[in-house]
Amino acid sequence: MNDYIATYYNPEKLAKAWVVIERDFLRETGVTLYITLMATLFAIIIGLPLGVILVTGDSKGIRPLPKPLMAFLNGLINLLRSAPFIILIVVLMPITRAIIGTAVGNAAVIVPLIIAAFPFVARLVEGSLREVNPNIIEMSLSMGASTWQTVTHVMLPESVPSLITSFTTAITTILGYTAMSGAVGGGGLGNLAITQGQQRFNQAVLLAALIVLVILVQVFQSVGTWLARKSDKRLKNT
């Protein structure tokens, strides 16, 4: 243990780590937040309606869709969810280049992040909507509400606390994915930990990046939990 500390946390290593922390950490934390929030936003924009379709278009849903279409959607979601993110980055480089004009940089990592995350969000939304009391849905339909009205005025409002919890899970997962942004020349704390920490054998930089990432996860989780509790009508009535 003493040898490990003497090797990786000696005054020289700590001095170099402090230079990196002062010079780069604030900027790379901002990059990590930018990539995470943008990817989460677009993953929700795509994943939320897709999750609604998975529930309402099911054979037992309120608006069943053709079985081949549902099989295709479920198969696509399962395929994208099963693909390792680091491989997805490489495979999607031509698509990323076609969309934003380049396959490298901070903006380039957002595209594969969205494609990796929206199926995950869709499944989370599906799970949240399936928790809604079916009696409430049936009551809405029996009163003459359309499918759109039932979804927007009953299903989504009733599942808000669960959806917030799901989106919190999604944003923390995407935050973890950003550590691989260096594969396409992107920045962020993960890339900084690899280039300035691991590759230069400076464990102090790795530890500092880990601490900041853990703090960010805790902040997102705490805010998400607070919002979910505030929006839960059952807790307000107790």
Image (spheres, rainbow, N blue to C red):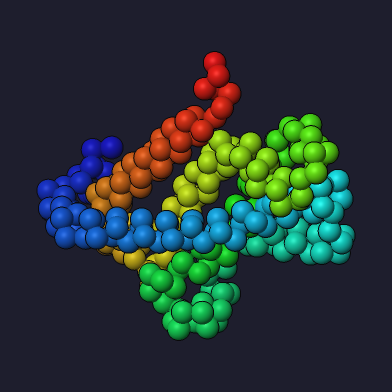
> Left or right: where does residue 167 sit relative to residue 200?
right
Q: Position of residue 78 (x, y in %)?
A: 71, 58
Give the position of the N terminus as an image quadrant: top left
Pick the residue in front: 142 or 227: 142
Q: Is residue 187 visible?
A: yes
Looking at the image, the residue that sits furthest to the top is 238
In the displayed structure, would residue 181 be above or below residue 92?
Answer: above
Residue drawn at x 81%, y 59% is: 70
Residue drawn at x 23%, y 55% is: 26
Q: Position of residue 76 (x, y in %)?
A: 72, 64
> Left or right: where does residue 72 sit relative to residue 216?
right
Pick the residue in front: 144 or 30: 144
> Left or right: where does residue 49 sit relative to residue 112?
right
Residue drawn at x 75%, y 62% is: 73
> Left or right: where does residue 62 sit relative to residue 102?
right
Pick the residue in front: 207 or 73: 73
Q: Position of residue 205 (x, y in %)?
A: 26, 53
Residue drawn at x 82%, y 47% is: 61
Question: Splitting the image into 4 quarters, where does residue 137 fall?
Answer: top right
Pick the residue in front: 207 or 106: 106
